[in-house]
Structure formats: structure tokens, C-alpha cells
Image: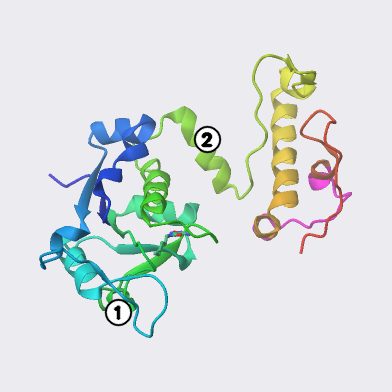
Amino acid sequence: MTPPWTARVLTLFPEMFPGPLGHSLTGRALEQGLWRLQVRDIRDVATDRHRTVDDTPAGGGAGMVMRADIAAAAIDAAGGELPVIYLSPRGRRFDQARARALAAGPGVTLLCGRFEGVDERVLQARAVEEVSLGDFVLTGGEIAAMALIDATVRLIGGVLGNADSTVEESFAGGLLEFPHYTRPTEWEGLRIPEVLLSGHHGRIAEWRRSQAERLTKERRPDLWRAYLAQAGKKDRAGEAELSDAHTTAATGGQRKDEGDEPDR
Ligand code: 4GY
């Protein structure tokens, strides 16, 4: 039998796993055998009396660096059939497309850094790819590993229910999500936008699209430009297909339309 999609995690803190991945959707999928999690303690490959995994940085400076021989031994002991990713702010950015690509493969081995990071030579010698979740610095790679696994596992066949898969489809469209509402119809004086209560499915779909466009334009000019290029659309106010993105407020008129920030 071919093994299920495999997340292999190399860490100095194996007790952190499965953590959140053992709950809810990913936890159920784990129990159902739709994916598996193999956690390896990096310290297990250390051979000296104190099971040392780090040493002081060459060239001086603060902190400690994970030794190349230790990290390499951990990677080698884990087995070689999966791509190895090192989670670090220096990496190429992780995104939904990458999650989809990983979900389509056999799995991934994730090397979780601690201290100041890992000796550069191990990345080179073991063809480890650095991947970043964003421009911020975590204490270690474990939380980033969990986030990458979570984003990927939910794309494995059979993990998402039909109701959940619409969110992925919507992101695949290149726009941020439109605003969501549920009862009560009025809460703290704030009403659900009238169109959503109209039962008019065509107008609702149109409102949601225009809201998604407005939010993307306001918050993510990078995504907005890609969307315009991809859709072959021109960003000119007054053109019918995009005009609503400029005028329709999400919050029933509470928020003033900031209007015409440049798109860059
Ligand atoms: N940002 N995206 C990230 C991170 C922790 C010290 C190198 C990030 O993915 N990982 O901040 N990782 C650091 C901790 C060693 C990795």
C-alpha cells in the first residue's frame, strides 16, 4: 500500500507536535489516515555525553548555531524520499500555490531551526530549500512548520468537506474573501447589508465580487495588479465591471470609502 501524504518534522521540541494539527479538520484527517505525521527529535542523532546540537557562531557574535553534522544526520536518518524545507524568514515566500503543489506530492520533510539558525553548509549539501511564511521572526521553525502543514493538509483529497472547499476556490480566483455575516440581522446597531437578505442570488454574487475586489484593491495592491493582469481588466473607475469596487461599502455605510489610493 502506498503511504498517505507525509509530514516529517525534524525538531528539538518533538512534544510540540501534533499540537493544533491534532485538532479539528487536520486532526480528524490524521485519525482517518488521510495523512501522517512523523516527528523526529534532532537531539537523538547527537552522540556526545551532553547530546550537543549547537555551537558558537564562526566569526563571533551572539547566540548559537545548529551544527551542520547534526542537522545532516537528522535529515539522513529521516529518509530521503521527500523534499526538505527549512522554515526561515530568508526563504522564498510560501503561498497557496505552493501549498497546492506540496499537497499534490508525497509529502515534505521540515527542518525546524532554533537559536540563530542552522549552519549554511547543510542547506547546500542536502539541497534544502528555505521557505518563509512572511517578514517576521519566530523563536523557532515549529510554529511555521505547523502552519505550512495545516495549509497543505487541508488541500489533500478527502480532507475538506464540500462546504469548506469554496474558500480555497475563492482564493484561487486571486481575490481576498468577501465579508461574511450571520444572524442576528441587527447587532449593536449594525445591520447585515440589505442585498444579502434580498434572496436575489444574482445581485448577491455581484455584491460579493465587488466587495472582494474593493478589499483586494485597498489592502493588497500586489494581488490586485495580478488579478487585473490575469482577468485582462483595466483599473479605471467608471468602467462598468469594476465600478462597484469603488463605491460599495462593506459595513453598511459605517466605513467611509477611502476611494482613490494609488494602486502602485
Ligand atoms: N518567518 N517563516 C519563519 C521563522 C524561525 C531561528 C531560523 C518565518 O518561516 N519560518 O521566523 N522561523 C527562525 C528561528 C532560526 C528560523
Picture coordinates of residue 239 (x, y %)? 85, 50
- Tell me if residue 232 is in the magenta stretch: yes
Query: Which residue lies under the disc numbered 2?
Result: 166
Relative to residue 235, is residue 64 drawn left or right?
left
What residue is rendered at 66% in x and 15% in y? 183
Residue 220 falls in image quadrant: bottom right
What residue is rendered at 69% in x and 41% in y? 212
In the rendered view, would you say 41 is above or below 170?
below
Looking at marks 1 and 2 on the same chain, the residue that comes earlier in the sequence is marked by 1
Q: CA distance from mark 1 to mark 2?
A: 42 Å
Label 1: state its secondary structure: helix
In the image, what residue type sits under mark 2? Thr
**Dot 1 alpha-carbon crowd within 10 angstroms: few under 14, some 14 to 19, many 20 or more:** some
- The one of 51 and 223 positioned closer to us in this rendering: 51
In the image, what residue type sits under mark 1? Arg
**Dot 2 alpha-carbon crowd within 10 angstroms: few under 14, some 14 to 19, many 20 or more:** few
In the rendered view, would you say 61 is above or below 220?
below
Residue range highlighted in magenta = 227-243
Do the residues bearing badges 1 and 2 touch, measured as CB atoms within 8 Å? no
Q: Quadrant of ligand 1?
A: bottom left
Image disc number at residue 121: 1
Q: Residue furthest bottom?
A: 59
Which image quadrant: the C terminus? bottom right
Ligand 1 under 8 Å from disc 1 Cβ: no
